[in-house]
Image: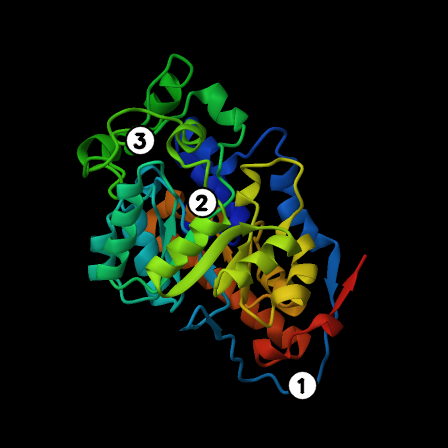
Amino acid sequence: MNITDCHNVNDFRSLAKRRLPFPIFDYIDGAADDEVTRRRNTEAYERCDLVPNVLAGVQDIDMSVEVMGQKLAMPLFLSPTALQRLFHWQGERAVARAAEKFGTFFGISSLGTVSIEQIGESISTPKMFQLYVHKDKALNKSMVERCKAAQFDALTLTVDTIVGGNRERCLRSGFTSPPKITPTSFWSYAAKPAWGLNYMFREKFELSNLKDHVSEGTSVPKSVADYFTNMLDQSLDWKMAEEIRKDWGGQFCLKGIMSVEDAKRAVDIGATAIMVSNHGGRQLDGSRAPFDQLAEICDAVGDKLDVICDGGITRGSHILKALSVGAKACSGGRLYLYALAASGQPGVERILGLLQAEIERDMKLMGVTSVDQLNRDKLRWR
């Protein structure tokens, strides 16, 4: 199986599973507790139907959107995700170049494996940085200042990781960053020699934006859940978020908003966007799916900031449903991480091309020529 045999996100998931040691794959694929919320995130879209119109003259399609002050060529962008060079040796560089080719936003994480400066120098596509607020205040300030210097377009504060979720797949496999070989996982790593050779002999693995301040995750193995619980600042509150927004001074997004109350507070502190997200079901199992919360949040604040639907997206039709409810755009992580793991930059480009084609085809079949024609009249719930 190769990427020409991959026609959707689930195909790329299958190929990624073949190519990664199981602890690495399970880190991408897994979620918290019973993984109920992780499954709900996609199933939520299946409870909603699109209502098409016909004979609409749909030869020319405009799927562009404006989000966080940037015009994107498509209404989907790539959420910031951690540890990308564990999945493929090209890591964030591959994902950034693919996003650039498709004219959409690309995000890097505080736990990224390529530096803020390298991305700033090499990538012209709109860029966001995902900030995890650490107990080390000098580290927080350093990352914000580095993003300013590198001319990032938006700062995204993740607000749903006060403690690490109970990711039982990672507990069973012993997954850490950097990887620690255990008796349980040894044969999985040994059975994937291509991954092992790339990890051993390519550029040394590091958390590029943290390594000068903390050793955990770069030279000291640490699970992501333990990292969140022990390294991040559990006193993070609305006042601190507002101070970060003021210090940044530009487009400011809160990632992990799931309630109307919090969405209104985001407006109050001057956020320009929110990502309606439950961290891919990796934090609070049993929480609502982003799509299920989207309507009430859009009704409350959709005219005051950009509402982005993040999570569970595997099809272009999912994106059109979220836009019809009121989202300005959608974002996702697993959808491109599977493709990255399967084949690096060509894989990410292929999944973006497939989703872009689905969006265009589905818009034509719905009888709309631009995304601003999408509204709730086009939807029915089961």
Residue 133 in which image quadrant: top left
Asked which secondary structure carries label 2, the reply is helix
Distance between the Cα atoms at labels 1 and 2? 36 Å
Q: Earlier in the sequence, mark 3 or mark 2?
A: 3
Q: Nearer the viewer, mark 3 or mark 2?
A: 3
Question: Closer to the camera, 30 or 296?
Answer: 296
* Whole-percent x, y for residue 186 in the image: 36, 17
Q: Nearer the viewer, mark 1 or mark 3?
A: 3
Q: How many marks?
A: 3
Q: Are marks 3 and 2 in contact (CB under 8 Å)?
A: no
Residue depicted at 39% across the width and 44% down the height: 132
In the picture, which quadrant includes the C terminus?
bottom right
In the picture, which quadrant includes the N terminus?
top left
Q: Is residue 149 left or right of residue 155?
A: left
Which residue type carries mark 1? Ala
Residue 368 in which image quadrant: bottom right
| Other-residue count near label 1 (Cα within 10 Å), few / some / many at <14 / 14–19 / ≥20 | few
- View extreme (front): residue: 239
Read off the residue under disc 1. Answer: 56
Which numbered dot is residue 338? 2
Q: Is residue 156 left or right of residue 275?
A: left
Distance between the Cα atoms at labels 1 and 3? 54 Å
* Whole-percent x, y for residue 364 in the image: 61, 76
Which numbered dot is residue 217? 3
- View extreme (bottom): residue: 57
Asked which secondary structure carries label 3, the reply is loop
Question: Closer to the camera, 199 or 288?
Answer: 288
Asked which secondary structure carries label 1, the reply is loop
